[in-house]
Image (tube, rainbow, N blue to C red):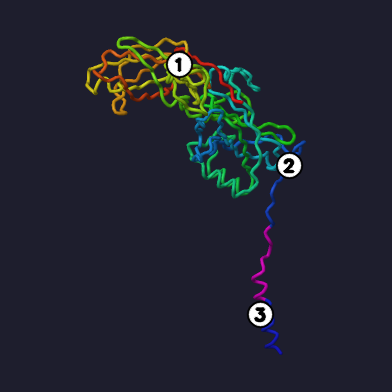
Amino acid sequence: MKTLIAIVFAVVLVLAMVVPAVAAPPPTVTTSVHLDGDNSSFGPIIKVKWEQSSSNSNGTTIPTTYGNVNPPLVKCGTVLVDYYAIVTGPSPDYGNLANVFAYVYSPADSPAPYNVPDDPVNPSVHPNYKYKVDFSPVTNIAAAVAAFNAVPSTALTYGVNNQGTRYTAADILLELNKPEATLWHGAANLTYEQPAGNYIVDVYGVTKAGKMSLIPTSPINTTPFQALENTFSYNAVPYIAIDFTSFNYGAVKTGVDTWVYGDTTMNPTLPNAAGIDGQGQPQPSPKSATVENIGNTWASIDFWQDDMGLNAGTPGINEVYYDYRMGNGVPLTGQPANLVNGVKVGPGSILDNSLGLSMREELDFSILIVQPIAGQTIYSGHLVISPNLRLFTSANPVSGQPDPCP
């Protein structure tokens, strides 16, 4: 019995040794909360934004472009621009967003009627207001992450945090996956005649209580308006359409400069032989030569024409000369052949006046044969008509008649 009592006592001593004399207190964290009408005193934050394009109305599939947009190059055509922004609502209610939208502005050098000073925010900052684009949230997280990851870093414009530093791709992906941030998307068209250049895009966010987004600074806009701003390029592409597939100078006499005039009626659905008809009379309207601007720049016109065999391909010999004119512009006279076997030789023959956006105009041609080939009366050749980009701020005259879309 004495032995058993000793063993029990020993076990009790061992247990007492492993129990702490005093237990450590649990950690205490200080908490706080701010309550107002929409759970925050702050507005949304635009973390990052970009633009892209992958579809137009000309019926062809085009590769996606980021930060720049290609014009459709089709009469009355349009190109769809997709506008994106990743936005966080005010903490802690990140879903408290009522609207995200963008104001878009035409390039600073836009000609009329695209230079209207009707900016809804501040006309002195952006005088060429284009339109407002309303956004919708992309609620599928995987789709939002994939859309963001597809954008080249050079096409992204990041917002600035309270410490004055830019958000990063890592910041964005972390918040998209929580989800703490939401991808918002809007889309709107640019028309074929919308002027080429850099378009300013200001993106705003609004809470359900009407508080606006707050951005400490932005890349371009230093005004106190609460937008994240960037630009995208509507790529400049001069492009024209003509309504004739052949041109007949008719019967001419040696040494006589003979003009054949066009008209201003564009007839693209029925390309025809312009110039002189089979009875020696000028082709009646709308069969005469007409040109139309279907690009997004002003376009000067460049002519390349061969010698129709009159020079026999001999360098330095000019037995034929051409004159060109567009509308009431100054004619370009005494132009030698500058196309040999389909190859452009030397500078083209460029008219001084240019076609305005979506304008159409008549083309007039003349021919002067200095010395024909003995025994030959019929000659044929080729004419190439090319557009050239003319800056909107150019001092050269711009001509043409409007041809509105139906």
Left or right: where does residue 370 sit relative to residue 147? left
Q: Amino acid at mark 2?
A: Val
Q: Secondary structure at mark 3?
A: helix
Residue 210 is inside the magenta segment: no
For this orientation, the residue located farthest to the right is: 37
* Residue 240 visible within the image: no
- Residue ID for mark 2: 33
Left or right: where does residue 106 sit relative to residue 24? left
| Rendered image quadrant of residue 100 | top right
**Which span is picked out in magenta?**
13-24
Please identify the quadrant where the N terminus is shown. Answer: bottom right
Residue occupying the point 33% across, 9% down: 256
Question: CA–CA distance between discs 1 and 2?
Answer: 86 Å
* Disc 1 packing (10 Å; few <14; some 14–19; many ≥20): some
Question: CA–CA distance between discs 3 and 2?
Answer: 55 Å
Mark in front: 3 vs 1 = 1
Q: Secondary structure at mark 1?
A: loop
- Residue ID for mark 1: 282
* Disc 3 packing (10 Å; few <14; some 14–19; many ≥20): few
User: In front: 200, or 249?
Assistant: 249
Mark in front: 3 vs 2 = 2
Residue 338: x %, y % from top left:
31, 21
| Rendered image quadrant of residue 129 | top right
Please identify the quadrant where the C terminus is shown. Answer: top right
Pick whichever of labels 1 and 2 is earlier in the sequence.
2
Q: Are marks 3 and 1 in contact (CB under 8 Å)?
A: no
* Disc 2 packing (10 Å; few <14; some 14–19; many ≥20): few
Q: Amino acid at mark 1?
A: Pro
Disc sitting over residue 10 in the figure: 3
Q: Secondary structure at mark 2?
A: loop
